[in-house]
Amino acid sequence: MNRSALTLWLFVSCAVACSRQVESSALALRYEPPSGMRLLSEDAGVPAEARFEGGLRVRSVPGAPLRLDAPPAEVLQAAGLQEDGYQSLTATQGTLSAGPVARHEFRRGPSRMLLYMVPREDRCVFVIYAASEQDYGRGLARVERSLSTLAFTR
């Protein structure tokens, strides 16, 4: 194999092997999680869920979507999270490339949680990041930047 062919092969191999993009038919989406948060598991159940390292989850819950201005308790319930002990810190609305979103932050004991809700026609998609107070800030910006890669396949 000549040197230029070897270089091209190494470049293509690294690009394929180093890609973090996840395409999930169960969740009907593509997403590139932040570096250091690789996919751990995917469950096609109801709700469908992908779990990543570092406390990151993406969950697709079928049914009529919530309004963007739904109260935090309703958002937690729709996401399938226990409401007990969560203190709502912020609730805002905005838009990502994937569409309109509601952004919530919660505190529960020594932990914090970021929850993005993306309503779709037939479901709600939740991006959930939870970490201890000391680790939360480091992951928060990385998770929010990664949301620009969220795209729906249906």
Image (cartoon, rainbow, N blue to C red):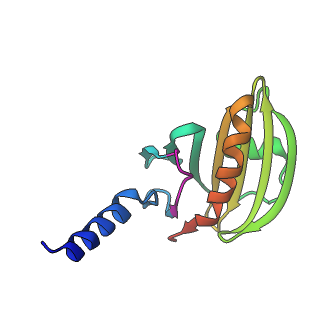
Instruction: Name the residue nearer the viewer: 103 or 66.
Output: 103
Residue that appears at 59% across and 43% down: 56
Residue that appears at 73% across and 29% down: 134
Q: Is residue 47 left or right of residue 119?
A: left
Residue that appears at 34% across and 61% down: 14
- Count of number-bearing discs: 0
Report whether residue 81 is seen: no
Q: Quadrant of the N terminus?
A: bottom left
Residue 86 position in % (x across, y down):
79, 31
Instruction: Name the residue nearer the viewer: 116 or 34.
Output: 34
Residue that appears at 69% across and 62% down: 119
The kind of secondary structure the magenta stretch mainly shows is: loop
* Magenta stretch: includes residue 21: no
Pick out the residue farthest to the front: 3
The answer to whether 10 is drawn above or below residue 40 in the figure is below
Pick out the residue farthest to the top: 109
Residue 99 position in % (x across, y down):
70, 70
Residue 40 position in % (x across, y down):
44, 41
- Residue stretch rendered in magenta on the structure: 30-37
Report whether residue 75 is seen: yes
The answer to whether 88 is drawn above or below residue 122 in the figure is above
